[in-house]
Amino acid sequence: MASCELTLEDLLPEVANVFAIQESALFNCMSILSTTITRHEEESKSKASAADIAQVRGDVKKATEFFGDSKKMIQRLEKTQERLLAELSDLRQENASKDTALAALERQQEQHMAAYEQHLEELDRRFEYIS
């Protein structure tokens, strides 16, 4: 029966894709927010009070900080992904060398068993000769 196990390597491309989509969405939101703010400032320049403009600028600053924090998080996650891929590669290399060593030991065991069987056959022949 086939196993439905997902490995870290199976999920990494999907996670990277999600991060790229989120980054694109953040850029899109920032563009929309900037356009909206600019349009809002232009439309209400004559009506807006200094407090309203300060509020909008504060909102823009908060959105920019959020975007910056999100970008930093994405970069940290990308570095973690790179590190995990490197660890996975190291583990694969280690497993490959262990598999090679195991195969060599199995061949050696087969050779020893063949030599042991030959030795037993020789002892049987000598015993028959003596009897």
Image (cartoon, rainbow, N blue to C red):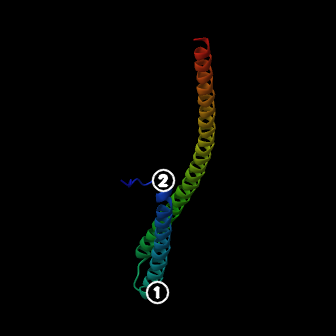
- The percent position of residue 107, horizontal first and vertical second, equals 62, 37
**The C terminus sits in image quarter:** top right
Mark closer to the observer (2, 1): 2
Q: Amino acid at mark 2?
A: Leu
Instruction: Name the residue located 54 percent from the left edge and 59 percent from the top edge.
Output: 72
Determine crowd level at label 1: few under 14, some 14-19, many 20+ residues with C-alpha closer than 10 A.
few
Q: Which mark is residue 129?
A: none
- The percent position of residue 122, horizontal first and vertical second, equals 63, 21
Front-lying residue, 93 or 53: 93
* Disc 2 secondary structure class: helix
Q: Which residue is mark 2?
A: 8
Mark count:
2
Is residue 9 rendered to the left or right of residue 116?
left
Instruction: Name the residue located 55 percent from the left edge and 51 percent from the top edge.
Output: 84
Front-lying residue, 65 or 106: 106
Instruction: Name the residue located 38 percent from the left edge and 55 percent from the top edge.
Output: 2
Q: Amino acid at mark 1?
A: Glu
Mark 2 and mark 1: span between their CA atoms? Answer: 50 Å
Instruction: Name the residue located 58 percent from the left edge and 45 percent from the top edge.
Output: 91
Pointer 2 or 1: first along the chain: 2
Asked whether the residues under the numbered discs 2 and 1 touch, taking CB atoms below 8 Å apart as contact, a structural biologist would say: no
Determine crowd level at label 2: few under 14, some 14-19, many 20+ residues with C-alpha closer than 10 A.
few
* Disc 1 secondary structure class: helix
Q: Is residue 94 above or below residue 36?
A: above
Q: Quadrant of residue 101?
A: top right
Front-lying residue, 102 or 128: 128
- The percent position of residue 36, horizontal first and vertical second, equals 44, 81
Name, please, the residue furthest toward the top.
131
- The percent position of residue 95, horizontal first and vertical second, equals 58, 43
Name, please, the residue furthest toward the left.
1
Q: Which residue is mark 1?
A: 42
